[in-house]
Image (spheres, rainbow, N blue to C red):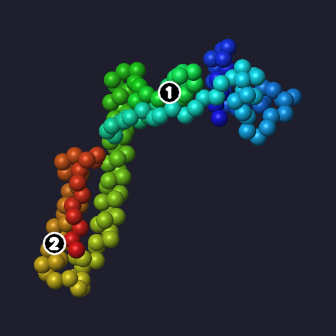
Amino acid sequence: MEIRNRSTGVVITDSQLRADNPNTSFPKQITADILDGFGYDPVLNGPAASTSGPYEVSTRDGVEEINNQWFTKFIVGPVFANSDDETAYRTKIDNQVAANVRSERDRKLATSDWTVLTDSPLTTAKKTTWKTYRTALRDISAAEGFPHTMEWPTEPS
């Protein structure tokens, strides 16, 4: 649990309060009355920031007072010092997502290998359908929206 010192505005944890007061015997759960006696207010969990797209995350940005209670505050992040940092971050995210997509593609190809073997029990027409599907899998990195919003080809039945 986080708590806020009323006089300094510093936010600490209840563990830090216990450590700062070694001669005080605190109960397992520190109540609002105990915090009040030490000049602290509890910090409640505020809502995460609403994000959209693959590059945004909800980032903690201190605490804020709402209706005489303190809450954790979140903003959409990350926040960059310059455009080069943002470009590097976006490239890193794109590369990570692309690697995950390729890994999933490789898994889908491996599980469908049996469909194109010469001794496969499938008919020639079914084998052709599976070959088309597997070609689409291999070409997934050229698909529109890759790597974030592309659509996977539908596996034949």
Q: CA distance from mark 2 to mark 1?
A: 53 Å
What is the quadrant of the N terminus in the image? Answer: top right
Amino acid carrying label 1: it is Lys
The residue lying at 31 percent from left, 55 percent from top is 102
- Residue 71 location, x and y as percent? 55, 28
- Secondary structure beneath label 2: helix
The residue lying at 15 percent from left, 72 percent from top is 129
- Seen in the picture, residue 35 relative to 122 is either above or below; the reply is above
- Seen in the picture, residue 152 relative to 70 is either above or below; the reply is below
- Seen in the picture, residue 65 relative to 144 is either above or below; the reply is above
- Residue 43 location, x and y as percent? 60, 29
How many residues crowd mark 2 within 10 Å: few (<14), some (14–19), many (20+)? some
The residue lying at 76 percent from left, 22 percent from top is 37
Residue 77 visible in rendering: no
Residue 84 visible in rendering: yes
- The residue beneath circle 2 is 129
Front-lying residue, 154 or 97: 154
Q: Is residue 151 left or right of residue 17?
A: left
Q: Is residue 7 left or right of residue 75?
A: right
Amino acid carrying label 2: it is Thr
- Residue 150 location, x and y as percent? 23, 50
What is the quadrant of the C terminus in the image? Answer: bottom left
Quarter-of-image position of residue 53: top left
The residue lying at 19 percent from left, 66 percent from top is 133
- Residue 84 location, x and y as percent? 34, 25
- The residue beneath circle 1 is 73
